[in-house]
Image (tube, helix red, strand yellow):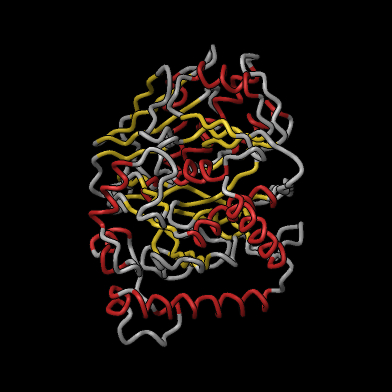
Amino acid sequence: MNLGIMLNLFSGLGQLRTHERWTRPQLAAYQAAALQRLRAYAYAHSPFYQQFHKGLTDRPLHELPVLTKPMMMEQFDAFVTDRAVRRADVEAHVQRMQGDERFRGRYRVNTTSGSTGSPGLFLFDRAEWTAILASFARAHEVAGLKMNLTKRMKLAFVASTGPTHMSARAGATLKSWLTPTLRLAASEPVATLVQRLNDWQPELVVAYASMAHVLADEQLAGRLRIHPRIVFTSSEVLTDATRRRITAAWGAPPFNQYAATETGGMAAECPQHRGMHLFEDLVIVEVVDEANRPVPAGVSGDKLLVTTLFSRTQPLIRYELRDRLRLATEPCPSGHRFALIDRVEGRSEDLLRLPAAAGGTRAVHPLVFHRVMDSVPASGWQIVQEGDGLTVLLSGVRDGFVDMALADALRQALMVQGATAPPITVRRVPAIPQTAAGKAPLIKAKSSPSLAEPI
């Protein structure tokens, strides 16, 4: 790791630690000042925002229009604040990338996969990238694992190894004597992952939630023999069943974290395990319904509107993320003053729409499926909506399980929700299919015109 980046990272972490002692009025004052600086910069340097917020530059945040990823990508050249940056040049750079190269010697480029219909390009200069790194390091500190310049810690990441993936770029930047890191593709064969992890013996493991479940099964079966101090999960819904499995494998519950390519780390779980603390000094998060109306704590929103206070190259102001989550109504017993996310439910696209018994359609919440599937004695599962039916994929099913009993339980759960159960097929597979990045989403909808538009 570049010594300058390391020093900046520790300096940034020190500042973030002081923020965590703020009162709510102090935090609100900081957010207001940081938001004012962000908007002033955007209005001065982005032709897109000069038009998008025309006549609104003095209006409060909640009155500003919502920014979507397709909107940003369609007007990319006008959106970015560096007038020398062009989308075509960035895309050409991405095609050539192999490691930690920077675009024009200045910007680290991250991409979203576009698996939901709209890929995205996101550029970060040195200051922005340091903020991204600090957000990830902060997640470890919130869990009780402070960075220490005098002590090494061996890390293992089981996620995407693509050179433009956010976690891969962060890992490449942070790789050093202080943090020797093994990065494994979640798409690799499980036997390969087990062998390499056994050889590496990491003290800290970070993995997609679905992969952490698989590794926990391997540990309990005796094939994986590692003893990490902490296991972090990210990028997918962490179900109660996966949390229990990880706890059984390594003697302690995992720490969940919430991040996005566009923003870096946004929230992390503390040792109380009551939810994830929002990094409100880095991002302003609005939990809203489909009509962009705010929903109160204790009520699940349909999406988030995120304002990234440190972004300058691509200022994100009320940027739409199609994630469903709920804010807690009670503070964390830890005394941490930042708002608490008590449940992340997945993407809005995970909300399946099925025929309603009373006519029309009924939106079925992912937790309806989680409650049924968490009792299934299997190492992995996935529910796929295709056409008029549901297919349930199961891997690693233990002996004695009856597939028809699962189908009946799902029909009963859907009936309680007022939905008419479509044909349900249970199919056993060697492994749950993964995306190109190695994720294994729990719920997928294919060719369903009633679903929300993809981002």
Among all residues in the image, which is located at the extreme top?
Answer: 399
Q: Quadrant of residue 329?
A: bottom right
User: Taking 389 as reference, is 253 left or right?
Assistant: right
Q: In which quarter of the image is residue 150?
A: top right
User: Is residue 176 placed above or below 63 in the rendered structure?
Assistant: above
The residue that appears at 67% across and 79% down in the rendered structure is: 25
The residue that appears at 43% across and 46% down in the rendered structure is: 417
User: Is residue 291 placed above or below 244 in the rendered structure?
Assistant: below
The tally of labels here is 0
Q: Quadrant of residue 282?
A: bottom right
Image position, residue 284 (x, y; %)? 52, 68
Q: Can residue 364 be seen in this view?
A: yes
| Nearer-the-camera pick, 157 or 331 | 157
Position of the N terminus by quadrant: top right
| Nearer-the-camera pick, 36 or 214 | 36
Q: Can residue 302 be seen in this view?
A: no
Image position, residue 90 (x, y; %)? 29, 53
User: Taking 412 as reference, is 65 left or right?
Assistant: left
Image position, residue 250 (x, y; %)? 70, 28
User: Taking 390 as reference, is 414 left or right?
Assistant: right
| Nearer-the-camera pick, 268 or 49 | 49
The residue that appears at 44% across and 20% down in the rendered structure is: 403
Image position, residue 60 (x, y; %)? 45, 82
The residue that appears at 30% across and 49% down in the rendered structure is: 119
